[in-house]
Image (tube, rainbow, N blue to C red):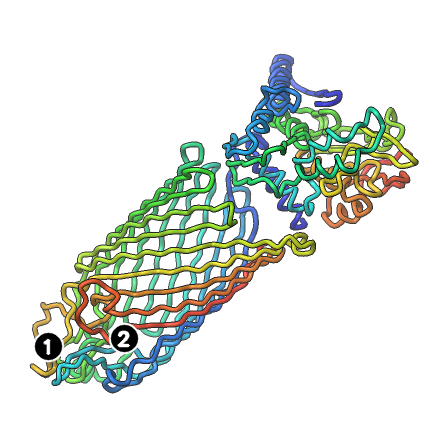
Amino acid sequence: MSNTLKKLATSALAVPGMMPFVQAQQPAESEAAYRFTFYSEDDSPASRTDGGAQERYQIQVHQFYLLMPYGSNMSLDVEGSFESMSGASPAYTYLDEEGVTRVYMSGASIEQRFDLYAQGRYYWSQAEAGIKGGFSIERDYRAVSTGIDGSLQINDQMTTLSGGISVGYDVINPTQDFSDTELQQANTPGRFAAKDQSIWQVSVYQGVGQIVDMNTVVQAGISVTHRSGYLSDPYREYSGAVVPYDIRPDNRTVFTLNTGLRRFMPNFNAALHADVRFLVDTWDIFSSTVELGWYQNFAPDIGWMVNNGVAFQVVPKVRYYQQTEAYFYEIPDHGEADPFYTADTTRYYSSDPRLSNYGALSGKLSLKTTFRSFAWNLTGERYVANPAYGFNASEETPGLPSFWRISTGLDYRF
Amino acid sequence: MGGPCDLHLYGETAVVEETVNLAKAEVCRLETKYSRYRVDSYLSQLNLQAGQPQKVDSETSGLLDFADQCYRQSQGLFDLTTGVLRSVWSFRDRRLPDTDALQECLRRVGWHRLQWHSPYLVLPTGMELDLGGVVKEFAADRVLAILCQQGVTGLVNLAGDIRVTGPQPDGKAWPVGIRHPRQTDQVAAWLPLAAGALATSGDYERFFELDGRRYCHILNPKTGYPGEQAPASVSVLADNCLLAGALATIAMLLGKDAESWLASLGVPFLLFDESLTVYGTFGERLM
């Protein structure tokens, strides 16, 4: 069946009353997509780096996606990605004898990750439900997850209720520098402690979307995620420490609240997207995110472009993020004691910069070009994190990442 | 519905009678709701509120979504806003429209000028919607849905838009005749219709001839005139009348490109060009 005929036939069948019985709202077309992303962190500043490599992570990601309608009320989709990562990451942060905050970088490494997820969805006239499952494989990490979700349109389809639950199970098996277990325990106690440890995760969310008028949609959602297991970072280690250099509580519960506004501006043929997100967890981290995006549509009124469905969408976005530190975050003072940490493993501590007080700014610019059944996407993003951008942040956190991210991809509907 | 309508039904008498009543009621409901001649019709109310945002009901919303898709897939030829061109075309008086009046009228034509974000519509002041191009076909499909709900086997014919529930009870297809575009009281071809729908669009319903050219009522929204070298008639087979009717109408508007377009879609069709040469992929041709 030709693409034109398929679109017309699907649109005809979507008219209420066309079918003798109520029909499902499944996707009308198949969709295939490929996306490539290049992510590059800024090098660690030499003045604050103590040993190790300065070149931080570079990641290349290849993503594949396929969505297929199945029968009259189902769809199947498969998503896979392959990542290759190289570079160094902060192993720990400390105050030296002169009171200067320094970061020790791990040796550069090359890692690869592969993941695959599949989902089946069932559609009714005003509701849908899905089940999803997948796995992720790295040299030192295995993860499986599954989940169900659904949505229901009520109030003459002006209101959409959605919800879901997912479960995940991860197994950690850190790479070891020593083959002998005694040497492992003595020299890399963090990795030794994490051997064959696991993490369970359960997440529940509930959302609501409301059409306010012909140009305005508001939405809100809450979620609760509980993780239990070995949540410390086994690679944050300090040569000479006799116990792991990063010990975190073995469970964490995270609550989030998301709110969003979508406002179409007919006079500009554009839409404003505004999102605010709050997060609070049992590690005493509180974070807030504000994101603003302007979706500018442009369809030239030129004959061959109109006939071939050529249209453009430019999307500038800005995002601000800030968080407070975890209650066990601290920068060890190597001037006072070496090794700083004791054998008391009941006390939690971590110098992971991602658990510190900090803020982050990011700017993103996207261009989407559609041509017939194809859409080409190009996005560039700059992200900068800094304690000075956060609230109540007086300390320095030189291990925080700043990065560039560029992605491009092609979507095809058929 | 602008022409003779008939139902051919098989079933128990009581059920058939009830089905006929339900079908009549449904056709009357749609005719009343979308009539452009009744000021109290739902369509007239939409047109009267041109210039301001209004929320349309789900049925109308579905029809406008379909019309929007037809507009896109026909490169702007299928357009529900062409109804205002009636004011400058007089088929009864057999005269061409005044050029200035036509150009002025064309400023009020164009699906792209209105804002349609289902279920909200902003119709610019001075413009009108005319759902005549979809409602008759939709009514035939609605009647067919009622037949299915009633468990009745039958054929629906609403002024030439024909749809069947399936084969007749003895397993035979329904013999359906296609009208000759010039000798309109004669059948030009027979088609055994066992499933789906047949819709025909032609230049013989409302037209006049002037200086050797035939001008029919199917008007191109970009020029305000009928398509150049338009077929005399196009019949299309599809799953439902809404789709078959839209394809037939678009083919008429495409003019000389109609045959190649229909062939590219892969739909069964029968086309008489302006010289009455027959093209197509179905039907037992009698002439």
Taking the image as shown, residue A227 lies to the left or right of residue B178, namely: left
**In the depicted view, which residue is nearer to us: A377 or A70?**
A377
Q: Identify the element where label 1 is drawn.
A: loop
Task: Return the x and y of residue B67 as percentages of the image width and height.
Answer: 63, 38
Q: Kindly identify which chain the residue marked by label 2 belongs to.
A: A
Quadrant for residue A199, please give it: bottom left
Task: Return the x and y of residue A226 as percentages of the image width and height.
Answer: 24, 55
**In the depicted view, which residue is nearer to us: A81 or A200?**
A81
In the rendered view, tell whether residue B56 sits above or below residue A362.
above
Q: Identify the element where label 2 is drawn.
A: loop
In the rendered view, tell whether residue B25 sits above or below residue A277.
above
Mark nearer the N terminus (1 vs 2):
2
Q: Residue at x 17, y 72 (%)?
A: A395
Residue assigned mark 1: A341
Residue B23 visible, this orientation: no
Mark 1–mark 2 CB contact (< 8 Å) = no
Say few, some or many: other residues with alpha carbon within 10 Å of mark 1 (under 14 / 14 to 19 / 20 or more). Answer: many
Residue type at tag 2: Pro
**In the depicted view, which residue is nearer to us: A250 or A195?**
A250
Taking the image as shown, residue A76 lies to the left or right of residue B180, namely: left
In the rendered view, tell whether residue B41 sits above or below residue A348.
above
Say few, some or many: other residues with alpha carbon within 10 Å of mark 2 (under 14 / 14 to 19 / 20 or more). Answer: many
Taking the image as shown, residue A241 lies to the left or right of residue A134, namely: left
